[in-house]
Image: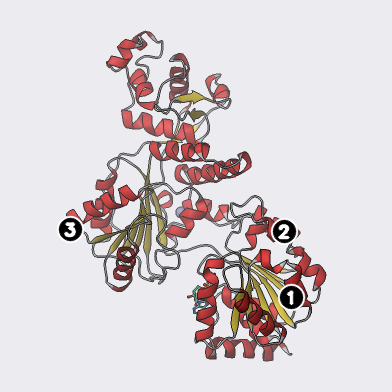
Amino acid sequence: MGEDASNAQALHILQTVFGYPSFRGQQAEIVDVVANGGDALVLMPTGGGKSLCYQIPALMREGVGVVVSPLIALMQDQVDALAELGVRAAFLNSTQSFEEQVRTEWLVRDGGLDLVYVAPERLLTSRCMDMLAESKIALFAIDEAHCVSQWGHDFRPEYIKLSALHEVFPDVPRIALTATADQQTREEIIERLQLQGARQFVSSFDRPNITYRIVEKANVRKQLLDFIEGEHKGDAGIVYCLSRKKVEETAEFLNGSGIEALPYHAGMESEKRSANQARFLREEGIVMVATIAFGMGIDKPDVRFVAHLDMPRSIEGYYQETGRAGRDGAPADAWMAYGLQDVVQQRRMIDESEANEAFKRVQGAKLDAMLGLCETLSCRRVQLLGYFGQASTPCGNCDTCLTPPQAFDATVPLQKLLSSIYRAGQRFGAAHIIDVLRGADSDKIRQWRHEQLSTFGVGADLSEAEWRAIIRQAIALGLIAVDHDAYNTLKLTEAARPVLRGERRIELRHYQKPARTRRQPARS
Ligand code: ADP
Ligand code: ZN
């Protein structure tokens, strides 16, 4: 098939089968490569339109497109949606009856399907491989391809065995797709799936219309209210909280303050939850207060802001949640408040989880990256995109670009802090250590005779809030570890030594008093 003819056919299918006027981003090129028998690796953010990249080539090529996906729960929906468009699709997974399975296998052999979705553990059974050997295969699509990566949190051992597909069916084109694009994952996908010859398509992860802002937590409800009233009165938005209780309380608080808000979390009755979701989608100007249970598959274009009252566990999570803002391309805000407690709580959740050490290390590294984004003195977007392996220049549309944070040489205050922790015997939490630094008169100070410590009162020049900001950053930087006892005891790490010895200078972000948020430039 000539290139022009192939392009014309792809566009024709896009319009007549899927009902869209034109391809988005790199879709046309990707479809072209795969339709003509080439391999492709596609890195595209969630919602970017990955599905069409294999669905259309499957319709263009002779035989059935075999889609490997770990998302068994979504297969039925995907197949139903395709059926509605007149595409002949089915799936093979452990949820179906033996009869259904046999019928689908028969359809595959008989050339009666355009697409078949298969769970990875199913695909590699000899029964399934035999079936494929007797069928005409248009292509293999390996969805959620980052599952081959041990570095990622979705690692699935069966994915590694998918390299067998290429060995058994060397002439069938393969397309691997994922929304996780860091360099390490990408390299692992290529190596493990033997995709060295594949064309790589890396879409931009940038969402230029989203303004990123991360503020220090003080009175978080008031900060949220100021933000919504000052900049998003009457707009639809999502407020993410970590716990169900906080979801309920925050929704109540907003309603009491004249902002129409609905709660959404997994602990609610499912009817109530769907009713709230339906209202959010249908009505205008509703604020959804939710746990991260909310958002999967939500496609509301005019969400004007996403606010986080608690820090997400990873940049992937932050990116996905903030990405629900401004799908229509008009300006939108990603606003987050975070503080010392977030750092302590997240570290604690990792340490106390039942997971194995390797997993905890990965989670710890992800948390560090998230903290790095919160504490950065340079452009948030550069940092965010850099995490996904994308280089960029300062954006001019994030808080650190618009009002550059002030840095200061924090070496001396850090030395005061670290030696106070040390001299008090590494057995106290942040509140008491701040009392020592500020020379406070408390029962606990007297009880432990801490007024006699040489560091007592050496930090009186800084406010409590300023000290909290310094402690938070010291934890983020790994100079201090937090014990997971009832007091969140602060301890020094190895990394604290060079600072105490004066061998390492450290710059920190200046504590900024929470000000009333500035007004956004008018939207066009
Ligand atoms: P992903 O798998 O990358 O998360 P999907 O394939 O589910 O994304 O697509 C996300 C949404 O974008 C879907 O609603 C899809 O129908 C829509 N979409 C994809 N490509 C196009 C296009 N070329 N034109 C219009 N809408 C599109
Ligand atoms: Zn910026």
Reading the image, the residue beneath label 2 is 160
User: At numbered mark 3, what does the secondary structure look like: helix, strand or loop?
Assistant: loop
Amino acid beneath label 3: Gly
Badge count = 3
Question: Which residue corresponds to the image point at 56% horizontal and 26% vertical from the top-left?
Answer: 504
Compare residues 512 and 488 and report the one nearer the observer: 488
| Residue 179 x/y as whole percent | 57, 63
- Looking at the image, do the residues carrying marks 1 and 3 touch, with CB atoms under 8 Å apart? no
Mark 2: is the Cβ under 8 angstroms from ligand 1? no
Where residue 42 sits, quadrant-wise, is: bottom right
Compare residues 8 and 510 and report the one nearer the observer: 8
Question: Which residue corresponds to the image point at 25% horizontal and 60% vertical from the top-left?
Answer: 261
Amino acid beneath label 1: Pro
Reading the image, the residue beneath label 1 is 173
Of tags 1 and 2, the one toward the viewer is 2
Tell me if residue 196 can be seen: no
